[in-house]
Image (spheres, helix red, strand yellow):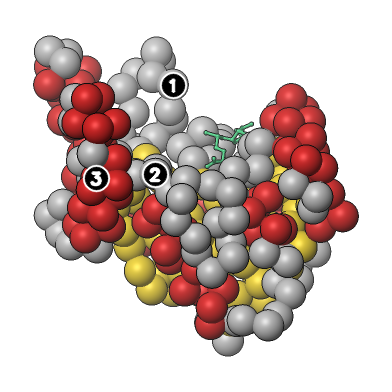
Amino acid sequence: MTRLGGVERTRTLTPRTAVIWAVLRAELDRRAGEQLTVLDVGGGTGGFAVPLADAGHRVTVVDASPDALAALTRRAAEAGVADRVRAVQGDGDALAGLVEPATVDLVLCHSVLEVVDDPAPVVAALAAALRPGGAASVLVTGRAAAVLARAMNGHLDVAAALAADPVGAAGPRDTLRRRYDADGATALLAAAGLAVEEIHGVRVLADLLPAAVADGQAAALVELERALAARPPYRDLAAQLHLFARRPA
Ligand SMILES: C[S@@+](CC[C@H](N)C(=O)[O-])C[C@H]1O[C@@H](n2cnc3c(N)ncnc32)[C@H](O)[C@@H]1O
């Protein structure tokens, strides 16, 4: 188990989480001693919310799924942080009506902008929820990795559709409405007035390796993922892109 300044008390870091926690830890360290107000949009069962509450912060999770929120509530209770976690059922597309403007220090929006009706108003609502100087942690699915994965599985037609589609979706059977590259995701956040400070690739290699390698050399893989995450071209081929942005003070 790797400890991250008290945030990761119980959780093993994985290629899916290590880079994001490293970025969040830097922000938490920067604001050490403060109890932050955190909003996790589409926070699901609390994979980030509960460790953040465990570190002493107050976290509101807005999610569309009652089942996910029920699991979040159980998980928060088991971790002894129920008093610092608030579960709100709601649609990210209607976020503006659910959150007081300029009340949040840190907003998370992980794996949600791919599925909402329209990402622009959601990002505008994230930005509006932040206090000036507050930070946003945004995780989106990468288009390039999806094109490569479909091609490597022999689905060249799907790879071609994904590469050509204006928003990186592959037709009506695609489970996602859109995918991103670093420039497109940066532009989306910038249009809402958020200044992107860092971009990292998440799962640059993890999804490409045989399970025996990923499982057998788990710690080495996490280290390599962290080493490559900020470096193009590796960053841009990652399964997901993590953007850390700030509402200007
Ligand atoms: C892939 S999960 C990600 C969960 C969490 N953010 C994470 O990274 O582990 C997506 C979550 O977004 C929620 N979700 C999907 N569409 C949503 C919407 N329109 N508004 C709010 N939540 C939504 C789902 O219920 C689910 O919990």
Q: Residues within 10 Å of mark 1 (few under 14, many from 20)?
A: few
Image spot of residue 188 (x, y percent): 42, 57
Q: Residues within 10 Å of mark 2 (few under 14, many from 20)?
A: some
For ligand 1, tell me if the residue under mark 2 lies within 8 Å.
no
Label 3 sits on what residue type?
Leu
Q: Is residue 81 above or below residue 129?
A: above
Q: Which element is circle 3 on?
A: helix
- Quarter of the figure with the C terminus: bottom right
The residue drawn where x is 73% and y is 31% is 71
- Taking the image as drawn, is residue 194 in sight? no
Residue shown at 74% from the left, 74% from the top: 35
> Label 2 amino acid?
Thr
Can you say whether 79 is above or below 148 in the image? below
Q: Earlier in the sequence, mark 1 or mark 3?
A: 1
Q: Is residue 93 above or below residue 243?
A: above
Location of residue 172 by image quarter:
top left
Q: Is the residue indicated by label 1 positioned so its CB lies within 8 Å of ligand 1?
A: no
Identify which residue is drawn at 79% across, 35% down.
Answer: 74
- 7 or 106: which is nearer to us? 7
Looking at the picture, how far across and down is residue 128, in whole percent? Answer: 66, 67
Which residue corresponds to mark 3? 221
Q: Disc 2 or 3, which lies upstream in sequence?
A: 2
The residue at which mark 2 appears reads as 14
Q: Percent x, y for residue 181? A: 28, 49
Disc 1 marks which residue? 175
Can you tell which mark lies on residue 24?
none
Q: SS at mark 1?
A: loop
Q: In the drawing, does residue 174 fall left or right of residue 38?
A: left
Compute the Cα span from label 2 to label 3. 9 Å
Q: Position of residue 11 (x, y in %)?
A: 54, 47
